[in-house]
Amino acid sequence: MSFTDKVKNKAEELSGKAKQAVGDATDNPRLQAEGKAQEAAAHAKQAGEHVKDAGHDVRDTFS
């Protein structure tokens, strides 16, 4: 995973957490749900990047 991708995914995760916190503070269920969804999407992207990195590592080992 490139450094840029890590930063973008972390920023999206933090944005989701912030959105969720604002939703909690204002008792806004829609904002809470959007924040959770955004955070989950960032985690999914990070997991996909980790799988891709692991594939590259395996390929490099056997090359």
Image: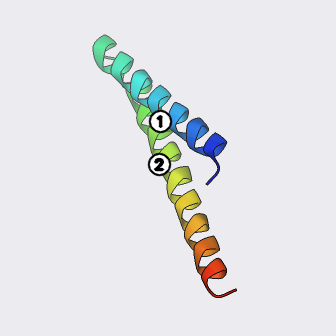
Q: Which comes sooner in the sequence, label 2 or label 1?
A: 1
Q: Is residue 42 above or below residue 44?
A: above
Q: Is residue 35 above or below residue 9?
A: above
- For this orientation, the residue located farthest to the top is 26
Q: Nearer the viewer, residue 15 or 27?
A: 15
Q: Could you tell me residue 24's position as x and y percent? A: 30, 20
The type of residue carrying mark 1 is Glu
Image quarter for residue 56? bottom right
Q: Are marks 2 and 1 in contact (CB under 8 Å)?
A: yes
Separation of residues labelled 2 and 1 (CA atoms): 7 Å
Mark 2, other Cα within 10 Å: few <14 / some 14–19 / many ≥20: some
Kindly identify which residue carries mark 1: 13
Q: Could you tell me residue 30's position as x and y percent? A: 43, 25
Q: Could you tell me residue 27's position as x and y percent? A: 30, 16
Kindly identify which residue carries mark 2: 43
The type of residue carrying mark 2 is His
Q: Could you tell me residue 62's position as x and y percent? A: 64, 88
Mark 1, other Cα within 10 Å: few <14 / some 14–19 / many ≥20: many
Which quadrant, please, contains the N terminus? bottom right
Residue 20 is left or right of residue 44, and the answer is left
Q: How many marks?
A: 2
Q: Residue at x 45, y 30 (%)?
A: 14
Q: Residue at x 45, y 39 (%)?
A: 39
